[in-house]
Image: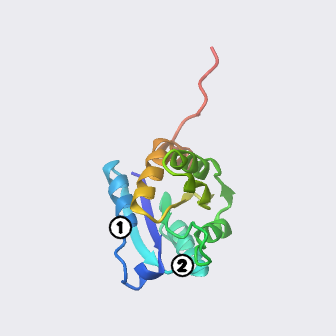
Amino acid sequence: MITVGVITASDKGSRGEREDLSGQVIKNMVEELGWEVKILEIVPDEQKIIEAKLIEYADEHKVDVIFTTGGTGFSPRDVTPEATLAVVERLTPGIPEAMRLESLKVTPRAMLSRAAAGIRGKTVIINLPGSPKGVKECLTVVLQSLEHGIEILKGTAGECAQPIK
């Protein structure tokens, strides 16, 4: 069973001024795969708060993957990638590269995403966009390979390479 934490970074959402739709899209998509969402939370766009939640989910709750949504753009309040980079031990640049590549097929503005991804301990952390549409586009790409990556990280999968014949 793959366990998931979802953090929505949104000032308005954390104050109850806007409904969180992106976090729910993540929850629905991963539950369709049989994964368990252990925590779904909305926090303000504050780097230290986001960092603390990422650390809590990874180190205390020990979820396999944390998806963040929101805070990946150019606004001065968009600090989710900085929070992620501050807490991960190893980067996984292919994940945000693949998301941007796929999103560029839909809109040239995808190049403005500052999403990051990495590994903390045995937890993968992935920044997703803040819109439900963007979350669905990016998560569709990520989910194709993520389960295998998590299995390797947890030590429950075999080699990626095929034997030489």
Q: Secondary structure at mark 2?
A: loop
Residue 119, image x, y percentages: 61, 57
Q: Is residue 55 left or right of residue 36?
A: right
- Neighbor class of circle 1 (other Cα within 10 Å; few <14, some 14-19, many 20+) is some
Three-letter amino acid code at the position of disc 2: Asp
Q: Which residue is found at the position 37% from the left and 62% from the top? A: 37
Identify the residue shown where x is 44% and y is 57%: 135
The amino acid sitting under disc 1 is Leu
Give the residue number, with chain letter if any, for mark 2: 45
Q: Residues within 10 Å of mark 2 (few under 14, many from 20)?
A: many
Q: Identify whether 110 is placed above or below 48.
A: above
Identify the disc placed on residue 8.
none
Q: How many marks?
A: 2
Determine which residue is flagged by label 1: 21
In whole angstroms, how far apart are the C-alphas of marks 1 and 2?
16 Å
For numbered disc 1, what is the local secondary structure? loop
- In the rendered image, the quadrant that contains the C terminus is top right
x 39%, y 70%: residue? 40
Position of residue 10 measured from the top left corner of the image (x, y, whole percent): 47, 76
Q: Examine the rendering and report whether any part of residue 116 can be seen.
A: no
Residue for point 64% across, 52% down: 92
The outermost residue toward the bottom is 15
